[in-house]
Amino acid sequence: MKKFAIRRMYSYFETTTQEVEDCTFDKKLELLDEELKILLAKYGLKFISHDIRFIALEKMSAKKCDNCDNLMINRDKNPTRFNKDNFWIDLDTDYNFVIFDGGNYEDKELCMECLPIEHRWGYFS
């Protein structure tokens, strides 16, 4: 039986409101897309689409873990995660393994994988 194997890839870059408004990254991302299409074709894969979400770091309490640089939402500051509006609903479902839960511990903001087990948002809690 034939099947389609669909593979997702996630990446991120840091930017500012001004860079978004000025479309600074558009040309770089267009060039990246062209290179990705060529690379995927080399392995018999077809590029279908991509999606970019801009997450307001302060508003969402999003940051990189102080220990390992995983992307995370500090649930001690934002216990509800994303706001569940249509724009963010997939970030609470499809993206929750890309943007980890996290919290405060000993003056650091740590993702769920770096928090100790006994912490409320620790991975094995």
Image (cartoon, helix red, strand yellow):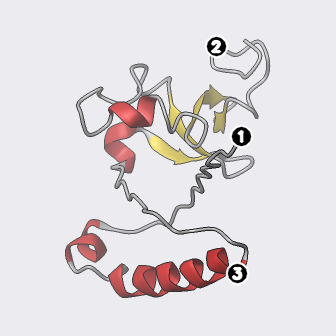
Among numbered discs 3 and 1, the one appearing first in the sequence:
1
Q: Nearer the viewer, residue 43 or 103?
A: 43
Residue 36 falls left or right of residue 80:
right
Q: Quadrant of residue 20?
A: bottom left
Task: Give the mark count.
Answer: 3
Q: Which amino acid, by three-letter code, is at mark 2?
A: Arg
Q: Looking at the image, is 82 positioned above or below residue 6?
A: above
Residue 115 x, y percent position in the rendering = 73, 28
Q: What residue type is labelled 1?
A: Met
Classify 74 as above or below 7. above
Query: Distance from label 3 to label 1 (Cα)?
Result: 24 Å
How far apart are the alpha carbons under marks 2 and 3? Answer: 45 Å
Of 2 and 86, the residue lying toward us: 2
- Res. 72 image quadrant: top right
Q: Name the residue under label 3.
A: 42
Q: Which of marks 2 and 3 is in front?
A: 3
The answer to whether the residues at label 2 and label 1 have Cβ atoms under 8 Å apart is no
Residue at image x 43%, y 20%?
79
Task: Of the two numbered discs 2 and 1 on the same chain, state the one appearing first in sequence.
Answer: 1
Q: In this view, does 18 lie to the left or right of 124?
A: left
According to the image, label 2 marks what residue?
120
Q: In which quarter of the image is residue 3?
A: top right
- Coordinates of residue 1 in the picture (x, y in percent): 71, 40
The residue labelled by disc 1 is 1
